[in-house]
Amino acid sequence: MERTENHKEKKKEKHKEKKYKKKRPEGIFRAFAAGLLIILLLAITGCGRQSLPENALEEGLSYLKKEAGKDPAEILQMIRRESAAAEEKTADESSEKEETSEKGSGPEETSETEGTEGASNDGESSETEGASNTEETTEGEGSLHPAGTEGDTHTEDNTEETAQPEPTAPDVPETGPSEAVPEDPPAELLAQIDSLQIAMFSEAELAEYRNRFMNTVFVGDSLTQAMLTYGFFDGNHIKFKRSASISQLGEEIDAALAMLPDNLVFFTGLNDVSFYIADPYQYGEAYKAAIAHVRSISPGTRVIVISLLPPSDYLAAVNLNLARSPEFDAQLRRAAEETGIPYIDCHWMVRQQLYLDDGIHFKDGFYTVLIRYLAYRLGL
């Protein structure tokens, strides 16, 4: 009996093994089909949004091991549910990122506005300081301008720099009418000349006029030297060569331009009459050459010429060459008109009592009126 029962149990075990062997291919097929569905669905859900994950195949294989005994339809539903949950999670994360970025943009705009206002205030402050420094500048060696400036005084602000075009030299006409400046002398100066009651500079007035001519240099012969001799200006503002004609002042012109002046004033006397007596026209051409030289080196410097003044009546009567000075003055005026620079006519202030004994040079009273008149004519 025991044998019979053992035999039956062995039979049942063999039957189970046969049944398992029949079902095994079907289970493998179902698992393989589920894996393919997983990979396909992952590819479809990722299409158009993101690339297929690198571990898609590994995830499919894990499903093969875990869900091999389940129906493919069940596996498909599970995948769809998980895919939908993943999409919702991704959407939530994206919305959180957008909210965070919007909140972060507020403070940035505020800081930018504050930075702009700060830069503007800094700029206003620096301009005020620059203006204050300009008023307190004193004369320096090697340049008529305060340290750190060239030409016109400029102030810099602390605002952000923007690309700007490089400054170009102003257009200077080769020919054309002279610069328009007032010609009639102030009534007060004319009255002083006519009465010979010239108000000399007080110390305060002289300091004021030196400040007005701070960026001006005079170039010439002994007529220019007299402004240094009388103590109106110092050597930085007076460049001269005694007994020289305009064509012989090259070194003095270069020395004047080395001071970086805003204005260069030519004031020469009767030496040129003797030098160019054979051809007064060449005198005008020599002046044009000197003006061109200044412009070639310093285009921004304004050039001014003072009229060629005559000798005293006594000297003109005994020296016929010097008596021809009006011819030369006409050539000087022509040179100024053709180059477009101011010609300052100072004949109205010539009085015989204001000459020195040599009949060529002038007393300090004449220069007092001259300096005041030049400041008036040049807008200094």
Image (cartoon, rainbow, N blue to C red):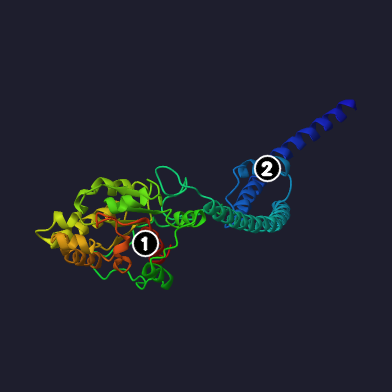
Residue that badge 1 annotates: 370
Q: In the rendered structure, find residue 180 and report the number of the disc placed on it.
A: none
List x then y, in percent, for residue 4: 86, 29
Residue reaching furthest to the top: 3
| Above or below 59: residue 118 | below
From the viewer's perspective, is 10 left or right of 104? Answer: right
Disc 2, SS: helix
The residue at 21%/53% (across/down) is 246
Q: Residues within 10 Å of mark 1 (few under 14, many from 20)?
A: some
Q: Residue at x 9, y 59 (%)?
A: 278
Q: Amino acid at mark 2?
A: Leu
Q: Is residue 208 left or right of residue 195?
A: right
Nearest-to-viewer mark from 2 and 1: 1
Element type at mark 1: helix
Along the viewing direction, whichever of 156 and 192 lies nearer the viewer: 192
Q: Position of residue 212 (x, y in %)?
A: 45, 57
- Residue at the extreme right of the image, as rendered: 1
Residue 337 sits above or below residue 101 on the image? below
Res. 307 image quadrant? bottom left
What's the mark number on residue 64?
Answer: 2
- x 20%, y 52%: residue: 245
Q: Amino acid at mark 1?
A: Leu
Closer-to-camera residue (304/29)? 304
Question: Residue 179 location, x and y as percent?
Answer: 32, 68
> Residue 191 at x, y = what percent?
40, 71
